Amino acid sequence: MNYFHSVRLDRDKCKGCVNCIKQCPVEAIRVRHGKAEIMEDRCIDCGECIRACPNYAKYVERDHIDDLNHFAYTIALPAPSLYGQFPDHIGPGRVLAAIKELGFDDVWEVALGAEIVSQAVGEYFKSNRQIRPLISSACPAVVRLVQVRFPALVDHIIPLESPMHVTAELARQAAVAKTGIDPNKIGIFFFSPCPAKVTAVKSPVGGSRSPVDRVLAVADVYGDLLHNLRQERPDLARADKTGIAWGSSGGEQAASGIGNSLIVDGIHNVLSVLEEIELGRLADIDFIEAQACPGGCIGGILNVTNRFVAKVQLQHLVRDLPPERPLAERLQQLGVDKIQVPQIVVEPRPIVHLDRDLKKAMQKLQQANELEEQLPGLDCGSCGAPTCRALAEDIVVGKAVETDCIFVLRERIMDLALGTYNLARTVPPAMDKRKAGMKEERDAAKRIDPDSGT
Amino acid sequence: MTSTNSYDLSLPVKGRCFVTAGQAASKIKRTLETFNLPPKLVRCAAICAYEAEMNIVTHACRGQVGLRVTEKAIRIVAEDEGPGIQDVDLAMKEGYSTASQEIREMGFGAGMGLPNIKRCADELIIDTYPNKGTRVEIIIHLQTNGG
């Protein structure tokens, strides 16, 4: 499968423990040969395994700021959650100036794209009344989760490009208009809070090419940003509070203006809400804001600040910003008239379970049920699968064997040991020195009953 | 029992028990997911199973939901020991419900159960006996030709 994953395994650091396999919301990890291998067709790049790993063996593949040299003109795209990484008296003007000092020619806040997308979401909501609830496409890990685990719900996803992509297009056009430079020589660098957005750039939903050229981790540039927080450049701030509030859970819903909504964050919580929708519930709700990270993007694993602190800092920043100027007015100042947010195609990518052939799949499920009954049901993970059920299914598709279970193995060894013992106790008649006529007693003494162990 | 040509499952449902409510439907959904059937049909079946199960939970004392999958169809049968349905035509109307106020306040008994099933199912057969129980049979075709 030719599909980019940003979440990777550092084999040297992996100790083969079972922490990550237990936390994966799509059961995409198996420990094999002492290493936690990721099943690429299932992984949604949510990064839960990175949170779970005590050995820092799971990491996010991303670009490096040295790549600035590859481009004639460079633009930084900070995510809204970045402002939450700093104390709230450090406003957008100082953060943006610090970003520019990293060596960028310009900086565009993704929060501006968020405002544009929010309006488009509101319009989409009004003109598409057939499907409820509609699910936001803002979190790429949630979109992948729906594609993989809830393929029947892809129609519920609002098929609009992300704020990141919209901002990137806008920034590139503006740079071309301003400098006349070849668009291909412009490098757009997104500052990502999470692995899912790295994947969204490297392997976008729908297969088109992303307008973002490089993705940096907030954590990688954070130290330099702290050193650069000297100047105040309010002129660099283009976004307003509506867009900035997207950085934390609930911000997107507020910006969309759709009142009858449900807000959910944390991938396991998202999973449970999607289960409800799949069972036909929640049809009386209009809009679902769902984010894989706890607390929204501020909880992304590539961010630095404690998410509860980041939440308060972002809240205070938004509260203290001056009143908003209309988006249309600001866009006009930037030389932009009307922006059509491009649509995306979200296709189902269901996991192939057991077998493509229904008859064979039914047989294999039956076998898996029977196998599961033989397993201890402890879900200990020692076999490398997250649950006994998962092991049973792995066995019937030929990816594991029964003796991968240490309890089954132990039983087999016990059987073998008893068999060996019983054999060892047999005595050739010529050497048997016990009295004749006690044959029955002799036979009984030879054997140990495997069931009672006596 | 499950033969080589079908897959069968029978799950008990407790009346008035909202701790276990929905478990049978979830199990049915997970089972169907492993068969790589068209996602839309799996969702239809899941909705039917859920609504049928919730009808037992909200109205009956006890019951069971059964699943049979063959190459031709998904069949879900929900049987209960309960009050039966007084007027089936009325029960098929959207918004009509005999559920108590308490149950409605919990967000159930909105009168959408049977109408939702009807929307999702290819065939729906309801046998009901007052003060005895109800049997709801739902069929979703897997093969479009020859029906």
Image: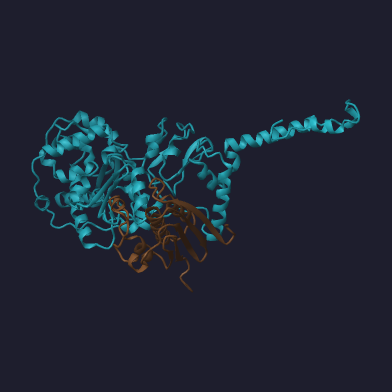
For the residue pair A132 and A82, the one nearer the viewer reads as A132
Classify residue A349 by image quadrant: bottom left
Position above or below: A303 against B28: above
Residue for point 40% across, 48% down: B17
Q: Position of residue A424 (x, y in %)?
A: 78, 30
Q: Which chain is cyan?
A: A
On the question of residue A400 being in view, the answer is: no
* Nearer-the-camera pick, A66 or B2: B2
User: Residue A405, relative to residue A167: is it above or below?
Assistant: above
Q: How is the image coloured?
A: by chain
Q: Is residue A22 visible to the viewer in this orientation of the structure?
A: yes
Coordinates of residue B129 in the picture (x, y in percent): 43, 64
- Percent coordinates x, y for residue A263 in the rendering: 26, 46
Residue drawn at (14%, 43%) of the image: A241
Q: Quadrant of the N terminus of chain B?
A: bottom right
Q: Position of residue A296 (x, y in %)?
A: 27, 41
Image hue for chain B: brown
Q: Is residue A133 left or right of residue A8?
A: left
